[in-house]
Amino acid sequence: MSTRRDEQRVERWFDGEQDGVGPGPEDRAYADFLQRTRGAVASLPASPGIDDARMGDFLHSIRNEIETPKRSWSGMWALASAAAAAVVVAISIVFIITGGPSPAEANTVDAVGSEISGATTRVDYDSDGTATVWVTLPESDLW
Amino acid sequence: MSVPFEGSLLYDVLPVADDYHWDARIESDAGLVALARTGQYSAFEELVRRYRNDVYALAFHYLRQREDAWDASQEVFIRAHRALGRFRGDASFKTWILRITANCCKDLFKKRRISTVSLEELGGDVGAYTERDPSSELESRELGSAIDTALAGLPHKHRTAFVLREFEGLSYQQMAEVMGCTMGTVMSRLHHARKKLQRALIGMGVIEDN
Amino acid sequence: MRLVSPLLLLTAVGGWAQSATEVSVSIVAVQARNEGGASKTFGPGLEDVKTAIEGLDFDSFTKVKGVTVSAKSEDETRVAINDTYTLFLKYVSRAKDGRVKVEARIELTPKKTGAIPVTALRTELTMVPGKHVNLGGLRLEEGELVLVLRVAR
C-alpha cells in the first residue's frame, strides 16, 4: 500500500520535478488517478479571459484609480505625535457620552506609524477595552 | 526605434507619445517594468495586456464569478502599479503578479465572506453520475466538471496549489514564489489538494475507491 | 455616564511618574488565518487571549509563541517572534492610577539575504494592566501575525 511519501514521490515524477520516482506496482492506481485528473482538467473549457474588445474598459478603470491621488502617510509619525493629545481627549469624550468602559479602564493608542512607504495603519477599540492596531503592508517581493 | 505597426492594438488604442521609444513586440517584462517606473504608463499597460488573462483566470478559479474576477483583476493591477518601485526582480514578473492575485483574492474572501462549500455538502449534490457514458471523452468531461465543482470545497491554500499546478502549469519553484512559501510546503499542499479531491470524487461516485 | 474627564483625573492624581523603571509584559504571537470554516477555531494555549482576538476577521487562530518579558526604560527589550518579525518594547512611565505607557515596535527582516530590517509598525500605547492590545496585519507564509500584549498588574 502506498504511503504518503511514496505518493509524493510519484507526484514529483508526474509533475516533471527533480527527485521524482516513477510509480511502482503499488503506486499504479494513484498514478492513474493523477493522469485521469490531468486529462479531465485539460478537457474543461478554457478559463474565461478578458478579450480585446473589453480591454479598453479594463484599462480605463485601472488608469482612473491609479491617477486618483492617494493620501500620503509619510510624515504621519510626526503628525500622529502632535495629534496624540487630541485623540485621547476625543476618545475620552466618546466614552463619557456613550457610557462605555471608563477611560481609566481602556487601552489607548497614542501614536502609530510605519517606516515602510505605502503602509497604512488603523486603530480599533472594542467595548471590552481591547485596542487593535492594524498595519497593511504594500505588495512587495521583499516580504 | 520602431513604432508599433499600424493596425496593431497598441497603435490603435494608445496615442503615441512624443517620448515613445520602445517596441512592445520585443520588450522584455523587466524592460517594461523599468520603463513603467520612469513614468511611461504605456509600458505598464503593455504588462497589463500580457498578463491580464493569467490574472483573470486565477481570480476566476478563486472567486467563481466573472464580475468578481473582473473587479479583482483590476485591483491586482492597481496594486501592482503602486508596488512597481518595490519589485526587485528576484521573482519573474508573472509569478509576482500571480502572487498579488492570490493575496488580493484572499482579501476579497475576507471582505465579502465568500464561503466555500464543504466537501461533505458536495457529496450528494453534484449532478447525477449514476449513468456514465463509456466513451472516454465524455467521461473525461464529466470528471473535469466534477473536479471543477469539488475545487470549491477545498481550503484556499490547497485550491491555490492545485490551480497553479494543473490549470496554470507552474513549476514547483514558480508555485513557491506565487504562494510565498517553501517548495516543501508547495509539495505538501499539492498532495493534500489531490488527496482531498480524490476523496470528494469517490464520494460523488465519479471515480472508484481503489 | 462618566462625570470626570480622564485628563482632569490625571491632574487630580498627579499625572505620570517615573515611579519604576520596568514593567512585565506578556506577549502571545498568534497566526490568524481564514480557512473558510463555519465557526472559529482556537488552537491550544490561547485561552487567555481568546476574548482579545475572537472579534478579528479570521476563523482559525494558532499560537506561535508565548513569552513574558520585562520592558525597561533605559533600552528596548528585543523579542524574536520568528525569522521575519521582531518585537521591541520600551517602558516609558506609569501613572498613579496604574496605567502604563509603553512603546512597541515591530521590525521586519526582508527575505533577501543582507537586507536591512525595517520598522513595519511603531506604536505608543497607554495600557491598562490586565487589558489586551493587538498588533496585527503582518503577513506570514500562511495567514497573518497578531501580537497580543498585556502588561502585568
Image (tube, coloured by chain):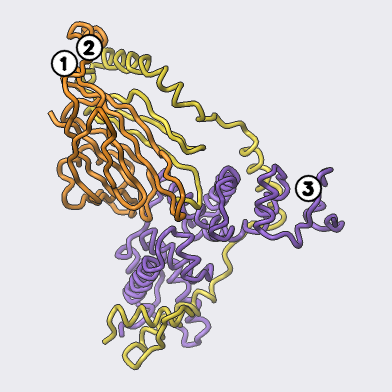
Q: Which chain is purple?
A: B
Q: Please give the residue where the numbered disc 3 appears in the rendered image.
A: B14
The image shows residue B202, relative to residue A84, as above or below, that is below
Q: Residue at x 46, y 87 (%)?
A: B134
Q: Nearer the viewer, mark 1 or mark 3?
A: 1
Whether discs 2 and 3 lie on one chain: the answer is: no
**Which chain is disc 2 placed on?**
C
Q: Residue at x 46, y 78 (%)?
A: A17
Quadrant of the rendered structure where residue C47 is?
Answer: top left
Instruction: Determine the colour of chain A.
Output: yellow
Q: CA distance from mark 1 to mark 2?
A: 7 Å
The residue most toward the left is C153
Q: Residue at x 38, y 64 (%)?
A: B158
The residue most toward the right is B6
The answer to which of C38 and C88 lies nearer the viewer is C88
Residue A131 location, x and y as percent? 28, 30
Q: Is residue C152 left or right of residue B116?
A: left
Q: CA distance from mark 2 to mark 3?
A: 64 Å
Residue type at mark 3?
Leu
The image shows residue B74, relative to residue C125, as above or below, that is below
- Looking at the rendered structure, the secondary structure element under dot 1 is loop
The image shows residue C97, relative to residue C82, as above or below, that is above
Q: Is residue A106 left or right of residue A56?
A: left
Q: Which chain is orange?
A: C
The answer to which of C114 and C82 lies nearer the viewer is C114
Mark 3: few/some/many CA within 10 Å (<14, 14-19, 20+): few
Residue type at mark 1?
Lys
Q: Are marks 1 and 2 in contact (CB under 8 Å)?
A: yes
Q: Please give the residue where the numbered disc 2 appears in the rendered image.
A: C15
Quadrant of the rendered structure where residue C4 is?
Answer: top left
Q: CA distance from mark 1 to mark 3?
A: 67 Å
Q: Please give the residue where the numbered disc 1 appears in the rendered image.
A: C96
